[in-house]
Image (cartoon, rainbow, N blue to C red):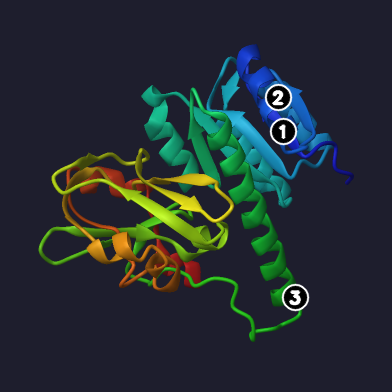
């Protein structure tokens, strides 16, 4: 099936659609548009789009229908969800169900272009991984999966539950592989509150793109990893152990855990 455009944007707000089209043109992406779920599903059934940007709340359905359609067709499309602050829980759920990223409304030019940069690199990694599997090649490791006892939010961040009731928070190696080398990291402070699905840190990379890091849980920060402040590249070198970001007392882990994916499933 031929590629109809680089990106399909599905949103009923014309102002959002116009903004996405203009921003995507800055990086020379071609864009197709659907103003409702029905039209979006029709376009997906007839055409291949490498990237689909869909609002979660649509007048005749929702973004989860778009996710399900992409999953059933088994094409190499990736989905970015957009959402307002009031529906962050739905956005977190979309990551659990297969969206590769989400960006809150209103979003900036940099937020959208950075998300597109990540998902395009994600797609390239997954395509190469599929090829290596087909060739039965085990000599090249593209990224390291999370340890089995960890839980992850989409492919971006993870938690490890400690015996003391705290959790460690860090970043997945696959997410790191979609970025350029880290030049600077901005962290919160001890006693700051974080919220699941809301940015808890930001990274500036060597190509000057800034990427917000989504918190996998809500809670209060009780320790910040001082080592990564002085050496941000530690996250790239050892994302699951020495490169952790925060130690947190979770606020509602029993509820929020349902949106986290057990990393043991990555080995099935």
Q: What distance separates the C-alpha of mark 2 from that of mark 3?
A: 39 Å
Q: Position of residue 6 (x, y in %)?
A: 77, 40
Which x, y percent locates residue 257? 30, 50
240 left or right of 224?
A: right
Mark 2 Cα within 10 Å, few/some/many (few <14, many 20+)? some
247 or 49: nearer the eye?
247
Identify the mark at residue 22; answer none if there is no mark: 2
C-beta proximity under 8 Å, tags 1 and 2? yes
Residue 150 position within the rendered picture, expressed as x and y whole percent measured from the top left: 34, 65
Seen in the picture, residue 59 relative to 87 is either above or below; the reply is above
Dot in front, 2 or 3: 2
User: In the image, is 224 to the left or to the right of 230?
Assistant: left
Residue at 48% x, 55% y: name it: 155
Mark 2 secondary-structure assignment: helix
Mark identifier at residue 134: 3
Q: Which residue is mark 1?
A: 26
Q: Residues within 10 Å of mark 3 (few under 14, many from 20)?
A: few
Question: Could you tell which of marks 2 and 3 lies nearer the N-terminus?
Answer: 2
**SS category of the residue bearing label 3:** helix
* Nearer-the-camera pick, 253 or 250: 250
């Amino acid at each position: 099936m031929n590629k109809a455009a680089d990106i399909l944007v599905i949103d009923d707000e014309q102002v959002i659609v116009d903004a996405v089209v203009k921003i995507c043109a800055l990086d020379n992406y071609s864009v197709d548009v659907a103003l409702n779920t029905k039209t979006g599903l029709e376009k997906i059934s007839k055409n291949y789009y490498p990237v689909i940007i869909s609002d979660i709340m649509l007048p005749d359905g929702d973004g989860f229908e778009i996710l399900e359609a992409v999953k059933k067709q088994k094409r190499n499309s990736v989905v970015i969800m957009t959402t307002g602050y009031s529906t962050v829980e739905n956005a977190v759920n979309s990551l659990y169900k297969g969206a590769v990223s989400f960006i809150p409304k209103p979003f900036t030019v940099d937020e959208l272009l950075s998300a597109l940069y990540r998902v395009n690199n994600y797609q390239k990694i997954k395509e190469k991984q599929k090829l290596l599997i087909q060739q039965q090649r085990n000599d090249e490791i593209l990224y390291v999966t999370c340890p089995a006892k960890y839980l992850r939010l989409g492919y971006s961040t993870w938690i490890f539950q400690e015996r003391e009731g705290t959790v460690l928070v860090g970043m997945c190696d696959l997410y790191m592989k979609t970025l350029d080398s880290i030049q600077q990291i901005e962290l919160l402070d001890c006693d700051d509150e974080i919220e699941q699905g809301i940015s808890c840190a930001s990274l500036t990379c060597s190509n000057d793109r800034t990427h917000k890091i989504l918190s996998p849980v809500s809670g209060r920060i009780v320790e910040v990893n001082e080592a990564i402040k002085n050496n941000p590249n530690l996250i790239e070198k050892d994302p699951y152990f020495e490169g952790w970001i925060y130690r947190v007392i979770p606020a509602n882990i029993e509820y929020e855990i349902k949106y986290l994916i057990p990393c043991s499933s990555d080995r099935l």
